[in-house]
Amino acid sequence: MDFIRVNDLLVNVLLHAGSRWPPKSSKPTAQPINISIAIPHDISSAAQTDDLSQSINYSTLASTLRIRLSPDSKQEPAFVSLEEILLRSFDLLLGDESNLPGARVKIVQIKPPLHCKALAIEGGATRGTSSSWNLINLQHRIEDLECQTIIGVNAAERLERQLVRMNISIAAHPPFTSRHTLDFRALTRRLYKNVEETAYLTLEALTSFIALETLRHLSVNAPTGYDPTVTVRAAKPYALVFADSSEVEVIRRIRDYPNQLSVPDKQFIDQPTAPKVHTAAITLGSNIGDSFQNIELALRLLEVPLQVISDRSIIPENAFLSVVDTSFLYESTPMYVMDQPPFINCACMIETNITSLSLLTLVKKIEEMVGRQPSYRNGPRAIDLDIALYDQSVIDTRAINERQTLDNLKGHLIVPHPRMVEREFVLRPLFDMIPEYVHPSLHKTIDILLKELLFVTNDPPMERVIPFPKYPLPLPKNSSTSTSDFHPSVVLPGVDPVAQTLTHWKYPSSIGAKTRTTREQKPKRTRLMATLNVTPDSFSDGSERNTIPSALAYVRDAIEKSTMDIVDVGGYSTRPGAAFVSIEEEVRRVIPVLRAIRNLAEDVRGKDKDQDQELEMRIRKILISVDTFRPDVAEEAILAGANCINDVYAFTGPDSYPYLSSASPQLQSQALASSSSVPFTNISSGTTTDPRAAAAYMQGMKRIARKFAVPVIVMHSRGEAGANKDYSLYDYARSNSGSGAAAIEGVRVELGQKVDEIVKGKGGVRRWFVLVDPGIGFSKTVEDNLELLRYGAEVTEDMVIGFGSNRRRNPLAGYPQLVGTSRKSFLGAILQKDRGKMTEGKDRVWATAAAIGCAVQQGALVVRVHDTDEMRDVVAVADALWS
């Protein structure tokens, strides 16, 4: 197509929007603009005849615009906006007397508001019927908006601000209305102010933030259906010595920010009015007494607000509060006041209909009930609860003239928490749950805020913590046994007692071969889980230790040699073809052994008092895991002395593959309420699965784990260990970063779905209690098992998984791993293939050692073994090599 153009026609207009500065009065300001027009026209006739009458007289077009748009024209005294000038230009070009087919017009405000080179609006129109015309596209532009901000990863770039140059283009989509008017001055002021307040490490993050802020501005009072496309180019002119600048360009629409743009623009309020159900983040910390017990009790009290606060003017009769997610648990060094014990920190997400100020009263009352005493500022405390976030609200209950300092916060509610950006012990727990949440004042995600803090701090990374409660429970008060193991506040009706902590494990917050931190980090100590099968038919050691004397001999030997950290007692074999075991039989096998282990300390007192006392203490602190998938057995085991649950079916029972998530309310209610099961057929194996049973297992195991606050190990499996080995559904992972192993992706997706259901939602298990097991040897080929060992860190790596619209953050990100390879058949298959050697389970000790060394290198926190004496040496050397 041919065009006739007039470029940068200088026109003087009266504009109510003002020029560099806002207008001093209601009178419009005279200022220059440049108008460029492009008219589509076939010039072939004019070219052949060299006759202007066969073309368009661009001089006439230019004169028409200059005369009719200038202040001298009585018809056009003043314009409200650049949009009005654009529309009037189309009237003049495509009006009654015009025979032009269409036109494209660009208007540039040469003297725009401060900090930018120019503002522009551009649109295209075509002639309609009779004398009308139709606007077919519309674009607004901000050219070379400049400001100074902290940007860059180099140390020098963090010390002072540098120039950033932004170019923003906003394309509206038809149909157009009179409300497609952009307040350039308000948008440029917003971008200039908010960009100056940022301190991003990367230009990519800053460019995305500029696009988000632009869309935020456009979303306010936008017409229905308005869905602009924003193109942002952000450049650093001083980044490179031998180049003009470095630059990033992004194209974004509202749908690209589903979480950040789902709420209205921020408002500063003292007592906000918000939707009936609010979402809030509460941080918890403790460094006096049994911190783990204090935190668990505080969480339980949160969920019974009507019993904590009796005043119905504060907590109304219909009030509810549910803890719907928790972070990992961390140990952190004190801030501000250093001469005190380290803190245990975490955070939780709640859903409630309680207002923000009533919620503040509630958490303060809980602090009092758990045992917080008046102390000096930033001093030690039994419990500390802070409301870090409340919806997307910005709240400050102080008088306006008192908001210039952070030294007067006592008794007031300030949300978001004003010091959260300088506290890793706040940001890291929030990152576990809501990494994409955008801080309503700083306009940055929790992910970005944490990365910025870690970039400038020299403190060692916080360590994560897994507490193990002390069981069995003490006898009732009317017995001769003391109840000091309970927190004194457990007498509150409706609140389950919280057991005292027996011990805890610590491990780095960043573990795994691919997630090493550059900051100085304490070495990880890999824990050993000893395998005690009290069964007659386990694949490797069946009938070896299924009597109480043989079981006790195994446990005592491991304790005396310090070759285990926890013993896993199981009464139901999971080997292929194993016989069915009733609940009663499983209880008969397991419970007496657990009780005997707990009574073992009474049998060690001998002649060497000091040595026997030390051994007795170690026995009393031994951790016991019960290997079961049944809620009834798990409860009996905990009451008998177990401190942990190890479930090879991840809370969904043995016949739950493929698993249909009971997170669906329809499925859960139908499955649990139905008098008959709703089976479906597993295409891979032809077996029949009952989703009602899976939902019942999930509900029952969550209830037990939550009630007793015990760690849980959940394993990836697909029913019978020798079946369901097809992972072709996940072949797309080969194009993703990392190993690309389909089996690894299958573990992340399938086990991740179950873990999300275990942890998230009302009644969920605390995140810090969950360990994940990739299920080596269960429904996997030999090569699948090797891939899970070679790239084990990828199972829990913080990465994007899934395909297409299902892409999301890995739901297993950050969870500690237990890896069990001991004596398994895939090791025997390798030995038979490579050496022609037929082996039984007990012949695979050194093969097990090789696999365990790899698991340690990939960051496993726990390895499950049969031969504790030999494997303790293997783990000691592997830890020295890889931690």
Image (cartoon, rainbow, N blue to C red):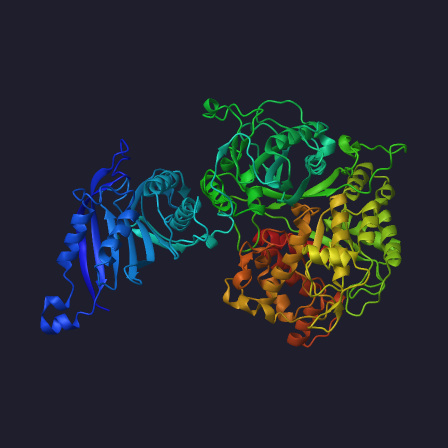
Q: Is residue 230 visible?
A: yes
Q: Residue at x 64, y 35 (%)?
A: 354
608 to the left or right of 794: right
Q: Residue at x 86, y 54 (%)?
A: 587
Q: Residue at x 46, y 43 (%)?
A: 444
Residue 328, how many percent across, how many down? 62, 45
Residue lying farthest to the left in this orientation: 50
The residue lying toward the viewer, choosing from 374 and 713, is 374
Residue 555, how many percent across, how many down? 80, 51
Q: Is residue 726 above or below residue 340?
A: below
Residue 730, how many percent across, how many down? 58, 67
Q: Is residue 491 above or below residue 258?
A: above
Residue lying farthest to the right in this orientation: 479
Q: In the rendered picture of this protein, how many numbered marks are placed on residues?
A: 0
The residue lying toward the viewer, choosing from 399 and 285, is 399
The residue lying toward the viewer, choosing from 433 and 14, is 14
The residue lying toward the viewer, choosing from 57 and 641, is 57
Residue 414, how many percent across, how many down? 53, 31
625 to the left or right of 261: right
Q: Is residue 367 above or below residue 836?
A: above
Quadrant of the image occupied by residue 541:
bottom right
Instruction: Say which quadrant the N terminus sits in.
Output: bottom left
Q: Is residue 629 visible?
A: no
297 to the left or right of 548: left
